[in-house]
Image: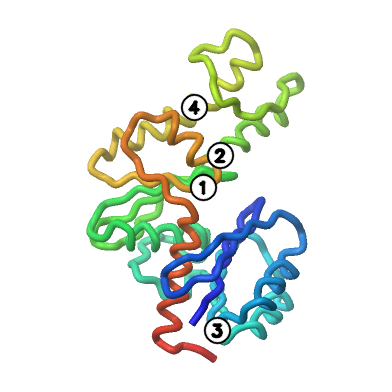
Amino acid sequence: MTNLIIDIGNTALKAAFAQGTVVGAVERYCGEGVLDFILGMTSAQKPAVIAISTVRKFDDNFYGRLERECEKLIVLNDKTWLPLVNKYKTPETLGADRIASAVAAKELFPGKNIIVFDFGTALTIDFITSSGEFLGGNISLGLRTRYMALNHYTQQLPLLDAPEEFDGIGGSTKDAINTGVILGLIFEVEGYIRQYPDHIHIFTGGDAIYFAKKLKSPIFVVYNLVLMGLAHVADYYEKKQILC
């Protein structure tokens, strides 16, 4: 059967139909009409399971409407069954996207120690052990957020977009901002890689390719890691026939 997996981030939604753990073509949406977008997908094909990871808040009416579109609705949280051991001390506060990525990473590299770097609105750095335990990780500012913070909390620094190329030392205010922001992130990530050289290093998120091109360390770039994790969770529920 077909499942619908949905990753709702701070700025965009990504969704795809999945056959088992195989993720199909990914659709992306930016806007306020999240429910209408999802209903547009379910009107074309009714899924057995809808699995959602979201960092946004929605009311009961939103989820109630989606429950009518499937046999089982899963909103990933600390109560959801997961094919790994969650060692996070406050699981109720753990972002669903982080745990979904950890599920996918574990399935991609079984028996390996892994660090997942998710380059989005925030930079998250999460650790998964070779025995399949999610240890947690760290949260820092993402690329765009760093530019916005410099602009917002100063009176004269402009809001810039990250350039494809930059100099090692900023010879102008614009160059100084770009160099400081980009090298700051690079040095931060390289610090983790040097500290944990025996780990598999996975880059994901909207800015993953940008930084993968600028680092010389061996890493894996995995698109749509959250969706892959959701596919594994949805597949489990479907196979166990926990359908209502």
Measured in 3D between alpha carbons, the distance from the residue under mark 1 to the one under mark 4, in whole angstroms, is: 18 Å
- For label 3, the residue is 72
Residue with the mark numbered 1:
205
Check whether the beta carbons of the residues at disc 4 and disc 3 lie within 8 A of each other. no
Amino acid type, callout 2: Gly
Contact, CB < 8 Å: mark 2 with mark 4? no
Q: Amino acid at mark 3?
A: Lys
Q: Earlier in the sequence, mark 1 or mark 2?
A: 2
Q: Quadrant of residue 217?
A: top left
Earlier-in-chain disc, 1 versus 4: 4
| Circle 4 SS class | helix
Comparing marks 1 and 2, which lies closer to the viewer? 1
Which x, y percent locates residue 19?
46, 74
Q: Which residue is mark 4?
A: 184
Q: Identify the disc placed on residue 92.
A: none
Q: Are marks 1 and 2 in contact (CB under 8 Å)?
A: yes
At numbered mark 1, what does the secondary structure look like: helix, strand or loop?
loop
Q: Is residue 203 above or below residue 60?
A: above
* Residue 22 image offset from top left, x and y in percent: 43, 68
